[in-house]
Image (cartoon, grey):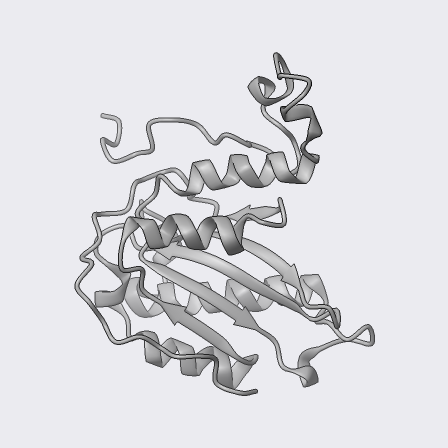
Amino acid sequence: MPDERALPEPSLLPLRGQLADDQRDGCLPNVLHQLRPVDLEAQGYAELLQRIPWQQFWTLTFRLNKTGRNGGVHVEAADKAFRFFVSSINREIYGPKWNTKAHRGLQWARGQEFHRDGRLHFHAVAAAPNDDLNRLISRYQWHEFWYREFGRNKIEAPRSQSDITGYVSKYVTKGGEVDFSKNFGAWLPPPIDYTVRPEQHGLIPA
């Protein structure tokens, strides 16, 4: 029986960097063709991600002693750090064999951005399959985990679907390049409890 909570539509941009057919054909020449490809990609990703009730926003940076000669952490090293972070959370919630479970752990989408000095940082949204991630883990604990291992960070809970729309548009998708968890789209996260929670003000200095 198909999963009733699965996303009803396929990804708007199934391959990173490739526009969907309906975005390439039949466009108004005086309007859509004036947009850069990266703008179209960002718009497509934003429309896709805004439909999902994400449970946390992650802003993850790297301190200078984790960076390469060009002033920014190597992309592969940054990706490895991010996946280690996600795996560690999954292990705490679902145990060491979390990847064998039907839901395959947390679902996430991640955009990358470079500071003017060349330092890379990530903006990501994440959700758990069976409950609000903010009830399953301590945001402060994992904030401290990333800070010890890699650098400054901010882990937040959205207060409304409007917060999700704003964060996705402003941060995650603005570069037109988004990476997804392998289980992205396999299930729809449960509804969010938007009970007011204490805010985390600013980033802890590295």
Query: Residue 144: in sight, yes or no?
Result: yes
**Extreme front residue here?**
30
The residue that appears at 61% across and 62% down in the rendered structure is 79
The percent coordinates of residue 151 (x first, y second) are 56, 81
The residue that appears at 51% across and 39% down in the rendered structure is 45
Compared across the picture, whether 78 is left or right of 152 comes to right
The residue that appears at 57% across and 47% down in the rendered structure is 178
The percent coordinates of residue 135 (x first, y second) are 21, 66
Q: Quadrant of residue 8?
A: top left
Query: Residue 105: in sight, yes or no?
Result: no
Compared across the picture, whether 179 is left or right of 77 comes to left
The percent coordinates of residue 168 (x first, y second) are 46, 50
| Number of callouts | 0
The foreground one among 87 and 27 is: 27
Compared across the picture, whether 15 is left or right of 155 comes to right
Q: Quadrant of the N terminus?
A: top left
Q: Quadrant of residue 121?
A: bottom right
The foreground one among 34 and 9 is: 34
51 versus 113 height, above or below = above
Q: Quadrant of residue 36?
A: top right
Compared across the picture, whether 85 is left or right of 142 comes to right
191 versus 139 height, above or below = above
The residue that appears at 56% across and 54% down in the rendered structure is 111
115 versus 105 height, above or below = below
The percent coordinates of residue 188 (x first, y second) are 29, 41
Q: Quadrant of the C terminus?
A: bottom right
The foreground one among 206 and 182 is: 206
